[in-house]
């Protein structure tokens, strides 16, 4: 075993290629698409955004962030609704994500996401929550 120090990028690419080749053999074409949604103010300053990864018949919210000055105005809800619309358009049957206890678990529950797992104590004093929403039922 070797800890890559000088060729991390090349090794990472090769590892991903190997996994993707295997996944395609097992489950067919991945049809991967990454969608980046942003919210900006009148001066083009970033207020928030969402990164969505879609593959096979599912989508994953990699990141959702809204600046403190823009919270409580429904922007997070608009972002997640647009992500769900994009996911449905891609043929996703479900959308999933994870969040920490100090981030937004209640927000996602209000949007119809169901918690299906968690990890306690990571980071210390907090927990990580995993959520899913079945788009065909939504």
Image (cartoon, helix red, strand yellow):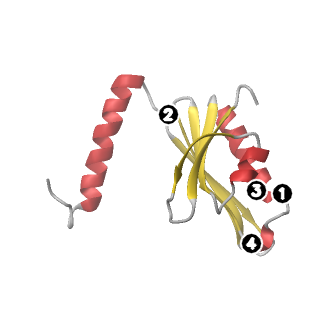
Q: Which mark is residue 68?
A: 4
Badges 1 and 4: C-beta atoms under 8 Å apart?
A: no
The Cα atoms of the two marked residues, 3 and 1, are separated by 6 Å
The Cα atoms of the two marked residues, 2 and 4, are separated by 35 Å
In depth, the one of 80 and 116 nearer the eye is 116
State whether residue 99 appears in this view.
yes
The Cα atoms of the two marked residues, 3 and 4, are separated by 11 Å
Q: Residue furthest right?
A: 73
Tag 2 residue: 31
The Cα atoms of the two marked residues, 2 and 3, are separated by 27 Å
Badges 2 and 1: C-beta atoms under 8 Å apart?
A: no
Judged from the image, the secondary structure of the residue bearing numbered disc 3 is helix
At a point 63% along the width and 32% down the height, the residue shown is: 94
Q: Sequence order check: which comes first, mark 1 or mark 4?
A: 4
Q: Mark 2, mark 3: which one is toward the viewer?
A: 3
At a point 58% along the width and 39% down the height, the residue shown is: 59
State whether residue 35 appears in this view.
no
Tag 3 residue: 76
Q: Can you tell which quarter of the image residue 117 is in?
A: top right
Judged from the image, the secondary structure of the residue bearing numbered disc 2 is loop
* x and y percentages locating residue 130 in the rendered image: 58, 45
* x and y percentages locating residue 28 in the rendered image: 42, 24
* x and y percentages locating residue 89 in the rendered image: 68, 33
Badges 2 and 3: C-beta atoms under 8 Å apart?
A: no
Badges 3 and 1: C-beta atoms under 8 Å apart?
A: yes
At a point 56% along the width and 29% down the height, the residue shown is: 57
* x and y percentages locating residue 19 in the rendered image: 32, 38
Badges 2 and 4: C-beta atoms under 8 Å apart?
A: no
Tag 1 residue: 74
Query: Label 3 neighbourhood size at 10 Å, few (<14), some (14-19), many (20+)?
Result: many
Q: Which mark is residue 8?
A: none
Q: Sequence order check: which comes first, mark 2 or mark 3?
A: 2
């Amino acid at each position: 075993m070797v800890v890559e120090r000088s060729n991390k990028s090349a090794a990472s690419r090769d590892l991903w290629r190997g996994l993707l080749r295997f996944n395609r053999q097992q489950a067919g074409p991945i049809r991967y698409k990454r969608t980046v949604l942003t919210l900006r103010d009148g001066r083009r300053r970033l207020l928030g955004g969402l990164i969505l990864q879609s593959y096979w018949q599912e989508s994953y919210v990699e990141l959702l962030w809204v600046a403190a000055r823009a919270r409580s105005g429904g922007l997070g809800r608009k972002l997640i609704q647009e992500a769900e619309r994009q996911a449905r358009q891609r043929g996703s049957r479900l959308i999933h994500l994870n969040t920490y206890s100090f981030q937004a678990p209640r927000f996602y529950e209000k949007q119809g996401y169901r918690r299906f797992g968690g990890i306690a104590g990571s980071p210390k004093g907090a927990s990580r929550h995993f959520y899913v929403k079945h788009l065909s039922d939504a």
